Image (spheres, grey):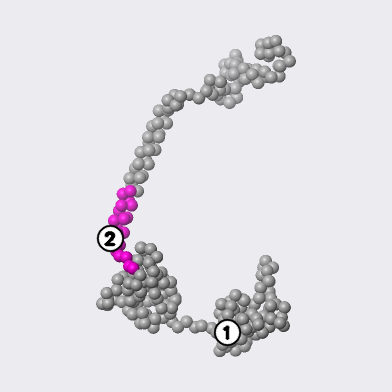
């Protein structure tokens, strides 16, 4: 076989080995009645013509077309079911939707949900609405910034579902003052003096300062250590005074 392939170029025998190997593996063996390639891999090797791109119509598979039609039919059924379900949900939701919008300066009644009340102050007999309150800003058609007294200590942004127009004669609403009276008085702790300061390190080795503070109305043995940022937040004036007083004596400052 090599002699036939090299013809008059005996020195090029190594270049035709792949062709000889392919021809041998693609030849039917007399004993097994199959080609060596087919016996080893279960299929016949591809020839040059097998690698030539065929026209698109020659690649059509009837089974593939039937399966593709089946998948398209399933997708159409799913889309139709989703469309019908969304229409049903929209109809149910729109039955209870109020088409109402407010402008800046309008007086409204606000509905305080249970999660907006401070812990331990909500009960079922509380008024569901209270006001009137002023609309400070229209964030969007669904969200509004409402003017609330700071004593409520809640977020002033309300959804349109929790706002009602105020007409001055809503018997289900309570006034803001009446609502505030039922809120617990927040106990604010006041720092009386800074007793000491120390520098500590975090787990990552970063240094930071902690201050020993005495609280107003409490004995000295109940003084506590707080972080520098907390001292700045609670009483920035006493923090500045302490820094100025001890800046020349301590290397911490």
* Alpha-carbon span between mark 1 and mark 2: 55 Å
Q: Nearer the viewer, residue 31 or 117?
A: 117
Mark 1 or mark 2, whichever is nearer to me: 1
At x 38%, y 38%, the residue is 72
Left or right: where 12 falls relative to 216: right
* Image location of residue 16, percent across then percent down: 67, 18
Q: Is residue 121 visible?
A: no
Q: Earlier in the sequence, mark 1 or mark 2?
A: 2
Left or right: where 157 falls relative to 253: left
Q: Which residues are magenta?
A: 83-103
Q: Nearer the viewer, residue 96 or 36?
A: 96
Question: Which quadrant of the structure image shows residue 141?
Answer: bottom left
At x 33%, y 48%, the residue is 83
Q: Residue furthest left?
A: 169
Q: Is residue 205 above or below residue 174?
A: above
Identify the residue position indicated by label 1 in the image.
191
Magenta-drawn stretch contains 52: no
Q: Quadrant of the C terminus?
A: bottom right
């Amino acid at each position: 076989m090599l002699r036939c392939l090299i013809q008059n170029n005996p020195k090029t025998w190594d270049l035709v080995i792949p062709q000889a190997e392919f021809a041998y593996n693609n030849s039917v063996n007399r004993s097994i009645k199959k080609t060596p390639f087919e016996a080893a891999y279960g299929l016949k090797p591809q020839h040059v013509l097998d690698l030539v791109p065929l026209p698109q119509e020659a690649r059509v598979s009837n089974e593939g077309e039937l399966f593709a039609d089946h998948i398209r039919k399933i997708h159409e059924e799913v889309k139709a079911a989703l469309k019908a379900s969304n229409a049903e949900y929209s109809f149910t939701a729109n039955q209870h939707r109020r088409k109402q919008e407010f402008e800046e300066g309008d007086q409204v009644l606000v509905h305080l949900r249970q999660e907006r009340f401070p812990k331990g102050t909500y009960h079922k007999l509380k008024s569901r609405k209270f006001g009137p309150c002023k609309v400070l800003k229209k964030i969007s058609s669904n969200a509004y910034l409402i003017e609330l007294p700071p004593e409520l200590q809640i977020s002033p942004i309300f959804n349109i579902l929790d706002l009602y127009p105020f007409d001055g004669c809503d018997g289900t609403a309570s006034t803001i003052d009446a609502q505030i009276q039922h809120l617990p008085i927040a106990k604010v702790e006041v720092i009386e003096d800074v007793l000491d300061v120390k520098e500590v390190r975090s787990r990552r080795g970063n240094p930071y300062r902690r201050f020993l503070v005495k609280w107003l109305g409490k004995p000295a043995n109940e003084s506590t250590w707080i972080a520098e940022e907390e001292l700045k937040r609670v009483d920035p004036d006493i923090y500045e005074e302490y820094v100025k007083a001890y800046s020349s004596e301590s290397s911490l400052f």
